[in-house]
Amino acid sequence: MTRRAGDPTPPAKPTRAQRKAELLSRIEQQRIDILVEAERWQLAAAPLDAGWQRLKRYRGLVYLAGGALLVGSARHPNSLIRLVKRLAAGGLLLNRARRLL
């Protein structure tokens, strides 16, 4: 196949060094994107982490209360069901009051 005078030149094939430089720049950009997203994720999860740390402080008390509830529920299961219903209603009431205020 012969070339004519008005034909555009075909695109030059990138050299190995050019391809390597392009790939390295893409990898560097991906690393930056990962760092930015990790920071965003840390900021979004910070309230959850703080709440978990607060719960961990009272872990012993939670275990003790859970054990007491377990023993009490084994002896009187109906009273535990009543208690759970009252706690759920109280929690819903507090949530609704918080929204109104």
Image (tube, rainbow, N blue to C red):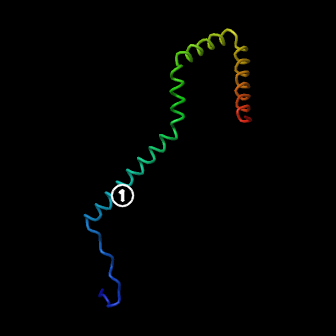
Where is the N terminus found, in terms of image quarters?
A: bottom left
Which residue sits at x=72%, y=29%?
92
Between residue 66 and residue 10, name the one nearer to us: 66
Q: Quadrant of residue 81?
A: top right
Is label 1 in a helix, a strand or a loop?
helix
Between residue 6 and residue 47, name the one nearer to us: 47
Which residue sits at x=43%, y=48%?
36
Residue picked out by circle 1:
26
Packing grade of label 1 (10 A; few <14, some 14-19, many >=20) is few
Residue 94 x/y as whole percent:
71, 28
Residue 72, relative to residue 53: is it above or below?
A: above
Which residue sits at x=73%, y=22%?
85
Between residue 67 and residue 62, name the one nearer to us: 62
Residue 30, relative to residue 66: is it above or below?
A: below
Between residue 3 and residue 35, name the one nearer to us: 35
Where is the C terminus found, in terms of image quarters?
A: top right
Residue 18, relative to residue 4: is it above or below?
A: above
In the rendered structure, which amino acid carries the disc numbered 1?
A: Arg
